[in-house]
Image (spheres, helix red, strand yellow):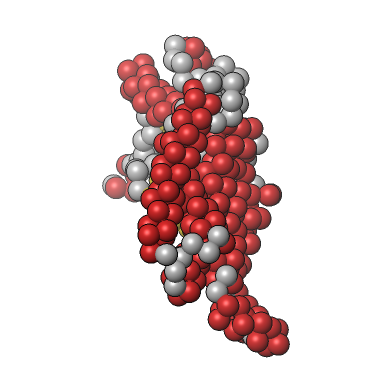
Amino acid sequence: MERNTTTYLIGGILILIFTFSLAFFILKRVGKDPRNILPVNFAQKIRIPLLIFLASLIAQIAVIGDVFMFETTKKIVGHISIIGIIFSVAWFLILLFKVFKKRMLKKYDVDSTDNLKARKVYTQYMILENIIIFIIVILALGIALMSFDSIRSVGISLLTSAGIAGIIIGLAAQKAIGTLLAGIQIAITQPIRLDDVVIVEGEWGWIEEINLTYVVVRVWDKRRLVVPTTYFIENTFQNWTRTSADILGTVYIYADYGLPVDAIRKEQTRLLESTDLWDGNVNVLQVTNTTEKSVELRVLVSARNSPTAWDLRVFLREKLMDFIQREYPEFLPKTRVTVDKKAEE
């Protein structure tokens, strides 16, 4: 009997090596064909779960075939092989979804100028990926635990009190559950998307990551602001790229009443036509306010996205200030003081 067990063990190892090599070879050849959905490196990514699956499958066949001499060994190998099959299948499903997501996202270019639809799809798939992986892992753990008779019997005995336990767990974890549901709600309603320009807690930045429980905002100075997903459901925030990436930029200039507005308007147009930062749509100069000391000129221009709009505003502010200093220095803001000579005498 011991000799037969050793023979079966050697045979199982040889079968494992053969089947693994064959499956790995087929997947590698299939991946090299660009017409297939599988990527070139899919065989490398799947080799570990494939090996676990084949080893567990061969072990399970040996258990069914009553190869093992001792009953205890048979039970241990049987449980380990079942767990190996469950987790390797879960691993397969996760990898396949990642491959499917990558293939679908190839159609969309986030780096393009008009990337609204691409950012929408990327956001949906990113959150959907987190949800699916979470569900697969939970199901795999549950099925693996239920494969043990002792745990299954405990679970059945607890069904009578499942209602009370569910209420207690729900109350204790309502914040965590609310955060998860907020992540799902963001994926569906999409108040924010990847690479959206937002102002959160007074900070201006881009949406860098959207996870089930938190969102990472990349602030303009390269800091990272980590915000719970519930924030974007429960609070008011600014989204500058909700419907499109293009945006208006403003520049305020304060000058004396004698400054000729038409000359500033012509210089502004000349400056805009000399730079690629302007998208050619909006070019406005208006007197928006007057005080006892100065007038307020508001420059309104458009750019293709928020970073470009910022650079355009800085460019115009510097060049217009230089133009006024050079051509009309006498009309810079000043404070007037009138001296009454009679009062002095």
Residue 154 lies in quadrant? bottom right
Judge whether residue 300 can be spotted in this image: no
**Percent x, y for residue 305?**
52, 29
**Percent x, y for residue 186?**
63, 52
Residue at position x 41%, y 60% in the image? 5
In the displayed structure, 217 sits above or below 315; it is: below
In the displayed structure, 44 sits above or below 280; it is: below
298, 324: nearer the viewer = 298
**Percent x, y for residue 253?**
45, 32
Residue at position x 62%, y 37% in the image? 121
Residue 334 lies in quadrant? top left
User: Where, quadrant-wise, is the N terminus in this rendering?
Assistant: bottom left
In the displayed structure, 320 sits above or below 175; it is: above
Left or right of residue 343, residue 68 in this image = right
**Percent x, y for residue 272?**
48, 16
Judge whether residue 99 can be spotted in this image: yes
